[in-house]
Amino acid sequence: MIVRINPFSALQDLGRRRFLAGTGATLSAAAVALMAGRPALAAGQGSKHDDLETDVRILNTALGAELEAIAAYAVGAGSGLLQKPVLDLAVQFQGHHKEHAAVLAKTIRKLGGTPVEAREHYQFPTDGLKTQNDVLGFAAGLERGAVSAYLGAVPLFRGRELASAAASILGDEAMHWAILRQALGQDPVPTAFMS
Amino acid sequence: MKHRAATAVLVLAALVSLPAGAIVPGDPVRGEAIYARCQACHALGYDRTGPKHCGLFGRRAGGVPGFRYSPAMAQADVVWDANTLDRFLANPTGMIPGTAMGYAGIADRQERADLIAWLRQASASPIECPP
């Protein structure tokens, strides 16, 4: 049995706490500290605000990429080039990206940020997509890139709970990549490490 | 066999003796494989979550027309060349705090050199980047 989880559930309370600490309340505390002649304390409060901004910025970049992936899978699924059961896989993976996007947007709001929205138009190399394997190869490239993107984001999160949640998404992207490679007849897990 | 081993030792010695900030020679073939890491957000010929890479060398940071950059990148006083790319790819948020490129960077100097070597070729390719 597969148990569906919310990787960001640890943020249910923590997010609100960090939000309150990182915005108005923090700035007030920093101002008070400055007025009290305690610049070091003020700087500390300011850095919490910076941490929050950093995390929201990283989450928004990830959200932008997830929204593009949703659109890319829509193009692939609607191309008429995918045959069952590969078509079902594409729709399933698109559903995962929708879940990622929803939870990222919710977390951004929880942290006091504004989630980016899907663009009206995305550009994809559709001229080069002539066969099912072309579509699979394109999708595999996006998923492989997503693994690296989350891998590169994890160490930058100031909140450890966010790093953990991003790693949970990373695992899903890696599974997508492996399955797509398998469908292409390639070694699904070509290396022991990802970078 | 002995000759190959000696050559390898000489190459390694040359790499080890490079100054800390020096750009090492890059292999564009390896660089193309490394570019796969960038493809969640970037493409050569069109803007995605990140800006396109065609015309990268010699372009001012934040300089792709119509792309919505972070304020930090838009205001960065940087022109992309091998040196600035090497610094940025090593630590994007360290070089340009506030960049939307929330990526820890490529720690390996040789990997950066390989990627930059490929980017130099591919971003000027008349096929990938028609005028």
Image (cartoon, coloured by chain):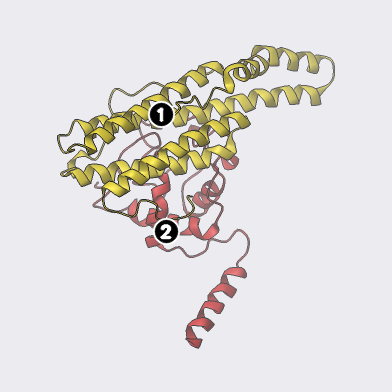
Chain colours: A yellow, B red
The chain ID associated with circle 2 is B
**Residue B78 seen from this side:** yes
Label 1 close to label 2 by CB (< 8 Å): no
Q: Nearer the viewer, residue B4 or B123?
A: B4
Residue B93, compared with residue B3, is above or below; it is above
Badge 1 element: helix
Residue A73, compared with residue B129, is above or below; it is above
Q: How many marks?
A: 2
Quadrant in the picture for residue B104:
top right
The chain ID associated with circle 1 is A
Tell which residue pokes out farthest to the front in this image: A1
Residue under label 1: A64
Q: For the N terminus of chain A, give its image quadrant.
A: top left
Badge 2 element: helix
Q: CA distance from mark 1 to mark 2?
A: 28 Å
Amino acid type at circle 2 is Ala
Q: Residue at x 30, y 41 (%)?
A: A139
Instruction: Tell us which disc is closer to us: 1 or 2.
Output: 1
Q: Nearer the viewer, residue A123 or B56?
A: A123
Q: Residue at x 33, y 53 (%)?
A: B122
Relative placement, left or right, of A42 versus A110 is right
**Residue A123 seen from this side:** no
Residue A49, compared with residue B86, is above or below; it is above
Residue B3 screen position, x and y as percent: 49, 86
Residue under label 2: B117
Q: Residues within 10 Å of mark 1 (few under 14, many from 20)?
A: many
Amino acid type at circle 1 is Gly
